[in-house]
């Protein structure tokens, strides 16, 4: 990893309101930071590739 690459850890509170047994829980996702990355972009990358 070079000096300008960073790994971002996003901790998300997840819950399925349609499930009677689902309980709120945190899940952590790691992704590489990209230039001009916003929280919206990071969450979309997580949704598309890791969730």
Image (cartoon, helix red, strand yellow):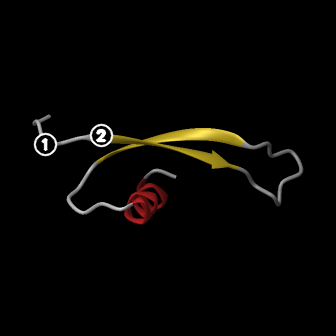
- Other residues around mark 2 within 10 Å, as few (<14) / some (14–19) / many (≥20): few
Q: Is residue 15 above or below residue 41?
A: above
Viewer-proximal residue among 17 and 39: 39
Report the residue at 44% width, 55% height from top. 46
| Image location (x, y in percent) of residue 22 | 80, 46
Mark 2, secondary structure of its residue: strand
Q: Residue at x 24, y 63 (%)?
A: 36
> Residue 30 location in percent, x, y?
39, 41
State the mark number for residue 4: 1
Q: Which mark is residue 15?
A: none
Instruction: Please report the residue visible at 39 percent of the width from the left and 59 percent of the height from the top.
Output: 45
Give the residue number, with chain letter if any, for mark 2.
7
Please tell me whether mark 1 sits on a helix, a strand or a loop.
loop
Quadrant in the picture for residue 24: top right
- The answer to whether residue 48 is above or below residue 15 is below
Q: Is residue 12 left or right of residue 30?
A: right
Residue at x 43% of width, y 65% of height:
40
In this picture, residue 46 sits left or right of residue 17: left
Gap between marks 1 and 2, in whole Å? Answer: 10 Å
């Amino acid at each position: 990893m070079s000096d300008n690459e960073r790994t971002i850890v996003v901790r998300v509170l997840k819950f399925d309101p349609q499930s009677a047994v689902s309980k709120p829980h945190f899940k952590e996702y790691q992704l590489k930071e990209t230039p001009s990355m916003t929280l919206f972009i990071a969450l979309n990358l997580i949704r598309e590739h890791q969730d």
